[in-house]
Image (spheres, rainbow, N blue to C red):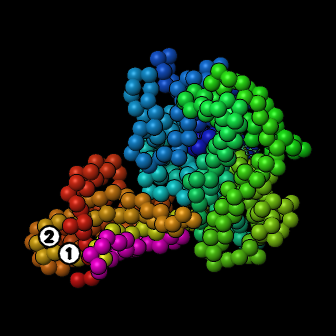
Amino acid sequence: MLYLGIDLGTTYSLVAYMNDHGQPTLFPDYHDANEFRTPSVVHIGAEGCYVGATLEGILDDEPELSQARFFKLQMGKPAAVYQDHLQRTWWPQALSALVLKKMLHDVEAFAHDEIGGALITVPANFNDAQRRATREAAQMAGLTHVKLMDEPVAAATFYGLNRKGAEQTLFVYDLGGGTFDATVLQAGDSGLYSLATEGSNQHGGIHVDAMIMDFILDEYQRQHGIRPNDETSLMILRRFAHDTKLALVKPGKTRVGKTFLLGGKSIEFVLTRELFHQMIEQFIDDTIAVCQRCLDAAGLDWSFVDTILLTGGSSLLPLVPEKLARISGRPVDQLVCKQPHQAVAYGAAILAAQQFGGGGAGPKLQSICAYDLGIRVMGKDQQPTVKVLVAKNTPVPASARMTFYTNRADQTRLIIEAVQQRDTSTGLEENSLGYFAFAIDNPRANYPLEIELAYDLEGLVVITARDPETGRQIRQLMDAQTEAMDNALLAQQPWVEAMRINP
Ligand SMILES: Nc1ncnc2c1ncn2[C@@H]1O[C@H](COP(=O)(O)OP(=O)(O)OP(=O)(O)O)[C@@H](O)[C@H]1O
Ligand SMILES: [Mg+2]
């Protein structure tokens, strides 16, 4: 049996397994045995569907070809992010499913065993809808035995592979293509326990690329008096900005100067490393602030941290270790950065073998939830507010129960809306999980309803509503079926039928 660890990334996706020597190993691309990453990019046209490196190769010659990228960032949003040649629209999970299918094709080409399970990693800061969309993608790709796991847990697992011994506090700084996670874990022979996690969906390599794009566009404007904004020009520019970044971070490189054609005009620019660092300084500082919040949430300071682990391709930006060293008060060479591109996939392969193959053997794993989980209720002042039942950073699985009451005596149903929320640097981020209705057969004042909110092991939410008088119960996953009900309910102003905390 083959157990797969899959890093389904914003920019690159990887698939790994444990070889006969107990080492995590990546599967190569079907068409190129030297390529071990699949760029997460999809094109669907009359001639077929192209995914990954093959498509990147075609784009070198045909940059105007339609393409879907970075759809991981849209996961969980009920919206089309790509239109194919037949004007069919594609949701992010369907595109992710195509990336998964492509990788399964790679696996089939190299392995002879049957797939016994796949462990797919997600950012620790993925909410319920994002996790659910990832599961849907796996299902669409035909994977039957699937587990989700937080990316920093996978990275920490890989770090711990050959490192048995004393308990230690690990800090994982994971700056990837589109997301940033900061996580504190307790690691040792007894297991791996997450203590706190914080993150941002606005911090990743693509955001750095966007800053370079803006810089080049400003230069273009100065030289030609206009700013190209057609899709093809922007796609060409994005790839160019990305290459410029990778050139600039090479050791010893102090400047990149280039001339190229864009929108039919030639553009010339020079970007020094110094200016590049000025450009991204605030951005890196933002990630450091997230780290600080994460430590605060765990009730720790840097002196408690034994090991700082850097992972994700963007953690190779030279400013990252520099700033982390400064804030943590330890030398740069004490920061650990081991195969930052592959660490998550390798860790996923180790965990997949343990969880699907080892019959539950292996160290204990304890994840936490990245969001407060609560219910929208009518507050004292008759204003909607969120009553939190499970607080962020609680170990999962977790559940909490509370009794709520009808708002009016003639209320024939209660609308239940579950909400995930967390504080970010820009304020309170709130994600509604959707609504469902619970009918009340014999309405009266202060009719009670018991609500239980639960996180399962994978951070997915389950809601149970129970009428204590009749014993009737609804157990609800917030899936596509509830989403369809949402709009109908919303049109009816659900707050009129909300619940109250006190009788
Ligand atoms: N040497 C480097 N210096 C700076 N950035 C780099 C370097 N190498 C790769 N990157 C950037 O790292 C990003 C890809 O990293 P990675 O593969 O870890 O992300 P991902 O897994 O696709 O994204 P996510 O984890 O956010 O879903 C890209 O934005 C890439 O430009
Ligand atoms: Mg990643």
Quarter of the picture containing the N terminus is: top right
Using the rendered view, name the quadrant where residue 19 is placed. Answer: top right
Outermost bottom residue: 503
Residue 221 lies, with reference to residue 200, above or below; the image says above
What x and y, as percent, mark residue 460? 44, 58
Q: Amino acid at mark 1?
A: Asn
- Left or right: where does residue 97 sit relative to residue 52? left
Dot 1: element: loop
Mark 2 closeness class: few <14, some 14–19, many ≥20 residues within 10 Å = many
Residue of label 2: 411
Residue at the image point whose x is 63% and y is 75% from the top: 296
Of residues 70 and 364, which is closer to you in this image? Answer: 70
Residue 62 lies, with reference to residue 409, above or below; the image says above
- Left or right: where does residue 260 sit relative to residue 70? right
Residue at the image point whose x is 72% and y is 51% from the top: 279
What x and y, as percent, mark residue 42? 54, 30
What x and y, as percent, mark residue 316? 76, 49
Outermost right residue: 252
Dot 2: element: loop
Residue of label 1: 407
Mark 1 closeness class: few <14, some 14–19, many ≥20 residues within 10 Å = many
> Looking at the image, do the residues carrying marks 1 and 2 touch, with CB atoms under 8 Å apart?
yes
Residue 448: mark: none
Report the span colored magenta. 380-404
Residue at the image point whose x is 47% and y is 57% from the top: 127
Q: Amino acid at mark 2?
A: Gln
Of residues 101 and 335, which is closer to you in this image? Answer: 335
